[in-house]
Image (cartoon, rainbow, N blue to C red):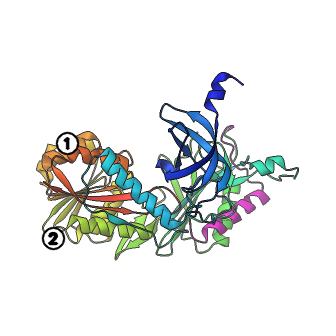
Amino acid sequence: MSRRSKQRKQVFEHIEVIDAGAKGKTVAKAPDGKVVFLPNAVPGDVVDVQTFKKRKAYYEGKAIVFHKLSDKRTEPACEHFGTCGGCKWQDMGYGHQLFYKQKEVTNNLTRIGHIELPEVTPILGSDEQYFYRNKMEFSFSDSRWLTLEEIKSDKDLGDKNALGFHIPGMWDKILDIEKCHLQADPSNAIRNTVKSFAIENGLEFFNTRNQTGLLRTMMIRTSSTGDIMVMIQFFKEDKVKRELLLDYIAEKFPQITSLQYVINEKANDTIYDQEVVCYKGADHIFEEMEGLRFKINAKSFYQTNSNQAFELYKITRDFAGLTGDELVYDLYTGTGTIAQFVSKQAKKVVGVESVPDAITAAKENAQLNNINNVEFFVGDMKQVFNNEFIETHGQPDVIITDPPRDGMHKDVVQQILNIAPKRVVYVSCNSATQARDLALMDATYKVIKTQAVDMFPQTFHVENVVLLEKR
């Protein structure tokens, strides 16, 4: 063994796991005082750690021996936990998950943003801790991921086909899923039935490395209205096999209201530049929220936890403090759900978004809901959201902003400061970038309220809503 690998790989014995950190990893302290990040432990565990990476300020490692199990632990519900990377926190009790999510948000705002916080409102947990997602995407593979136990066993492993999820960090490895706890029935039944039928009828599963096979991905969307959308992505056109599968799905699951497909011959499986063909039923499903109906097609973005999205939007509207006289700007409006949700209490809402399809959907949904006091515009935020735009559409009283994970471009932050509305409501799925943006606004705006919302139980993700008022 080289000297270098000796230095890099070490074993630390009887280390207590003390905290949960970013991206679902837990934190321990090495004997030399450096932090160790672990993917497979729970705060309160006492473990032996094998390190596999050494950095200047920290180690990355794995717990290899458990001397004491934490009282924060719970039994994971899913048989795939630990191999599938979807739900990293299933082994931690839900109350403890909420504690660490809240702590991360507060730490980010105070440490990164150096923001003076009001009394922090407790995080809003989710009533449903499993089966809460309205959208799942599964991948087909002809060479499924084998677990260590399978590799070591002498058993015949049978066929290698898989319909499931990517192994974290491996673009070409798919873990076959028997039962997923994230989407309600009939999601598991549809996936397992499609897989069995495809194998029985010789429909080839995709091979990512060789770019061969027929079946690529399957998306299932469900909604609170009872609608179900299924979309199969094929690598090439084979009319006989395609119709064989789609007819079988339609016959076996008559409750599917939208059955669609895509023929995608390119190297990656994103569908945004592909034609989606409606095979049976409608080319969309409906989601409903407080009497508003939202039409969702295969490419639409919609919050994946419908019930918690409703709670998130109610908090956003409450923070906006609308009386009916305000002009509201909704930045990064997506398909305009927040804009329409607050429109009843505003004089007018102006939504801006860079994705043309999303704005088309936003306009269509506003029409569907007979909302006449919203306007939507498409374009890159930092270019569209300029002085000319403000002169044309008016000086906003309130700005609601819900940017992607990277947060707002500094030019957009500067423009908000130039306009200086009396209130800004900042919705974020990444409190680290939110904190960075809030720091830029701190001289002009004071944080009045902050509310974390758990949209994704069993994972480390958390949304946060902040109300800013002019100092």
The residue positioned 21% from the left and 47% from the top of the image is: 441
Highlighted magenta segment, given as a residue range? 183-210
Q: Position of residue 277 (x, y in %)?
A: 53, 57
Q: Residues within 10 Å of mark 1 (few under 14, many from 20)?
A: some
Specify which label sits upstream in the sequence, 1 or 2: 2
Q: Which residue type does callout 2 highlight? A: Gly
From this view, report whether residue 298 is shown above or below residue 142: below
The residue positioned 17% from the left and 52% from the top of the image is: 445
The residue that disc 1 covers is 414
In the rendered image, which quarter contains the C terminus?
Answer: bottom left
The residue that disc 2 covers is 324
Q: For numbered disc 1, what is the local secondary structure? A: helix
**Residue 304 appears in the figure:** no
From this view, report whether residue 327 is shown above or below residue 270: below
Q: Position of residue 197 (x, y in %)?
A: 74, 62
Q: Position of residue 5 (x, y in %)?
A: 65, 27
On screen, residue 38 versus residue 420, left or right, reads: right
| Between 433 and 140, the one nearer to me in the picture | 433
Taking the view exactly as shown, the residue that stands out farthest to the top is 3
Q: Which residue type does callout 1 highlight? A: Gln
Residue 70: within the magenta? Answer: no
